[in-house]
């Protein structure tokens, strides 16, 4: 690693620490750090801290999955929800509400919906022992469109009031309702990110070509299957706790590729850091911009992410 | 001469079609072997079977006394490298990073390159005359530069055997000669054994010490350029009329193509 890269990563760490503090202090009620540490404010502190932690876990998980999928599909437009996770989770949740299951089982329904959808997409694309990337992308897109249609149909025909609560699922929220569930999800996501990082050398090789990777001693088909499994677990677990947060998994990897280059050994940790920062800040905005109203975080990530990306892209083009 | 790779009654290809049918031959250490044949004769398939991209259905491939299907893939890739026709890369890796990937078979997961790996990478860059490109991004290079970089990556694998699949088909004549001269130099000085699929018969004649002519998945003829590149062999396999002359400088066979208009009916 060159000194410049080390400095960039160190800088990201420092920014993340500052963002964490800022994210905890800011809220619908502004409290200073010393006030927050008082006993009577313990409740607020733990809620905000959990929220910031979820922002970090979700951001890092989405960025790492985005990177992995972009490399194995060799398509820079791939994003974590490409394989239908989001629409599957949404459909699972909507169906659960209509059937009338208890609210605590909703995340489970969403997780099942996401998992079953990924299995469906995967088996649609499979040809014998191989999974051609083009068919995988296509079947992912088609299943997503079909399921989104069914979701909208169900919402518009059902009189069920609870369905309006599905909105947050479709645009995301980092409110932590259930601490136990949060710890399980965090554990799954962190293990997943570590596994993706361990495969970073394989990702480097696969991103220059599947056969190229075989010639470098990588068992491409096996690695691809492992990575699909890992990214599916990450996105399905995240979707069931914080809904669908678009853009992070697509745009943060791109931005970091422009800043630190495409080498996954460096790209994965730095994109995870950057995505964590981005999510903590976006969540803070979603809570404070129109307080006490909360704007879905997916709206903020889209509105802020796009201009940052365009500016960086233009800067890069000028350098070339 | 010692045998490096032994192909023994090999059959294989794709799920629905057996492209290579019962092929046997040997690659000796120090060989510069050319594999020629018409479109669809199985040249690339043969190369992909020998480099483990495709799994063989019958027969054996033995690399230095070891059955290649029983070798660990990374171990195999420390001995055998592959250069494809053309490599399109969507991601902006720098030239140096690409060449460094040639060290992957020698590294454990998560292991960063050592000083030794760095030296080998630099050496591969300078051998292929791409050192001046090392900071550049791979997707900004011309076809000729890119192919030299891909060869540098293969050399960084420190292979004993290098396979190439029509490495010059996208290049102009100047760059074709540049690449093949480079390979010849590696073949002579570093004792690198080379097996290469070529479309251009005259390039095969000029550079290869041995040629295999494939036809419909079988070996039609094997031997020195002089033995293989006769007008009878070429006309039978390629189904076109040619005249075989001598290259005035190297006195190797030189295949001249004849347009349909200039063939006078024999009867």
Image (cartoon, rainbow, N blue to C red):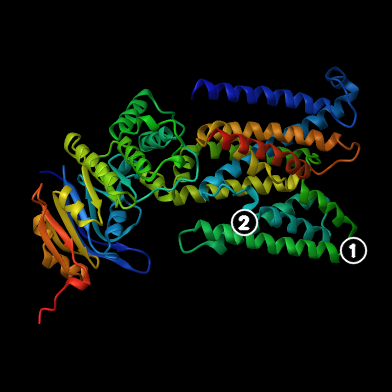
Whether residue A188 is visible to the viewer of this picture, yes or no, is no
Whether residue A209 is visible to the viewer of this picture, yes or no, is yes
Q: What element carries label 2?
A: helix
Q: Where is residue A1 in the image (x, y as percent from the top left)?
A: 49, 25
- Determine which residue is flagged by label 2: A118
Q: Which of marks 1 and 2 is nearer the N terminus?
A: 2
Would you say A183 lies left or right of A132 here?
right
Q: Where is residue A312 in the image (x, y as percent from the top left)?
A: 63, 35
Would you say A268 lies left or right of A148 here?
left
Q: Position of residue B108 (x, y in %)?
A: 41, 34
Q: Quadrant of residue B260?
A: bottom left
- Determine which residue is flagged by label 1: A159
Determine the chain carrying the residue at label 1. A
Above/below status of A128 relative to B176: below
Determine the chain carrying the residue at label 2. A
Residue in front for this viewpoint, B4 or B184: B184
Would you say B143 lies left or right of A194 here?
left
Which residue lies most toward the front here?
B262
Task: Mark 1: give few (<14), some (14-19) or many (20+) Cα within 10 Å.
Answer: few
Residue drawn 22% across the image and 56% down it: B35
């Amino acid at each position: 690693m060159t000194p410049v890269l080390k400095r960039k990563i160190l800088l990201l760490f420092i920014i993340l620490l500052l963002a964490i503090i800022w994210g905890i202090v800011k809220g619908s009620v502004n409290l200073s750090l010393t006030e927050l540490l008082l006993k009577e404010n313990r409740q607020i502190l733990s809620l905000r801290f959990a929220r910031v932690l979820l922002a970090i876990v979700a951001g890092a998980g989405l960025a790492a999955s985005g990177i992995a999928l972009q490399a194995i599909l060799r398509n820079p437009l791939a994003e974590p929800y490409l394989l239908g996770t989001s629409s599957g989770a949404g459909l699972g949740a909507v169906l659960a509400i209509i059937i009338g299951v208890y609210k605590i089982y909703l995340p489970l329904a969403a997780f099942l919906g996401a998992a079953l959808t990924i299995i469906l997409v995967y088996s649609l694309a499979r040809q014998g022992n191989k999974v051609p990337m083009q068919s995988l992308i296509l079947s992912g897109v088609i299943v997503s469109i079909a399921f989104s249609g069914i979701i909208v149909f169900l919402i518009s025909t059902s009189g069920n009031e609870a369905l309006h609560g599905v909105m947050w699922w479709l645009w995301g929220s980092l409110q932590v309702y259930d601490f136990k569930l949060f710890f399980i999800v965090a554990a799954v996501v962190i293990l997943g990110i570590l596994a993706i990082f361990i495969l970073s050398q394989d990702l480097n090789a696969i991103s220059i070509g599947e056969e190229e990777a075989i010639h470098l001693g990588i068992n491409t088909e096996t690695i691809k299957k492992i990575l699909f499994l890992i990214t599916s677990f990450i996105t399905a677990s995240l979707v069931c706790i914080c809904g669908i947060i678009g853009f992070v998994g697509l745009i943060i990897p791109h931005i970091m590729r422009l800043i630190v280059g495409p080498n996954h050994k460096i790209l994965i940790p730095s994109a995870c850091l950057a995505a964590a920062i981005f999510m903590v800040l976006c969540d803070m905005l979603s809570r404070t911009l129109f307080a006490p109203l909360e704007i879905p975080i997916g709206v903020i990530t889209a509105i802020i992410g796009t201009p940052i990306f365009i500016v960086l892209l233009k800067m890069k083009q000028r350098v070339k | 001469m010692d045998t490096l790779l032994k192909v023994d009654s090999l059959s294989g290809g794709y799920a629905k079609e057996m492209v290579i049918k019962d092929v046997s031959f040997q690659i000796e250490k120090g060989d510069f072997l050319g594999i020629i044949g018409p479109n669809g004769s199985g040249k690339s398939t043969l190369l992909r079977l020998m480099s483990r991209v495709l799994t063989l259905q019958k027969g054996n491939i033995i690399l230095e006394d070891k059955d290649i299907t029983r070798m660990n893939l990374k171990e195999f890739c420390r001995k055998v490298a592959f250069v494809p026709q053309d490599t399109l890369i969507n991601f902006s890796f720098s030239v140096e990073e690409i060449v460094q990937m040639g060290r992957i078979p020698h590294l454990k997961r998560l292991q960063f390159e050592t000083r030794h790996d760095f030296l080998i990478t630099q050496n591969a860059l300078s051998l292929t005359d791409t050192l001046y490109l090392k900071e550049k991004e791979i997707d900004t290079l011309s076809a000729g530069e890119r192919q030299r970089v891909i060869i540098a990556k293969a050399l960084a694998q420190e292979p004993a055997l290098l396979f190439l699949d029509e490495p010059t088909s996208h290049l102009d004549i100047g760059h074709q000669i540049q690449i093949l001269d480079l390979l010849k130099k590696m073949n002579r000085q570093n004792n690198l054994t080379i097996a290469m699929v070529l479309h251009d018969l005259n390039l095969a004649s000029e550079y290869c010490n041995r040629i295999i002519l494939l036809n419909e998945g079988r070996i039609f003829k094997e031997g020195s350029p002089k033995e293989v590149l006769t007008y009878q062999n070429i006309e039978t396999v390629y189904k076109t009329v040619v005249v075989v002359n001598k290259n005035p400088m190297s006195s190797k066979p030189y295949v001249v193509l004849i347009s349909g208009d200039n063939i006078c009916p024999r009867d």
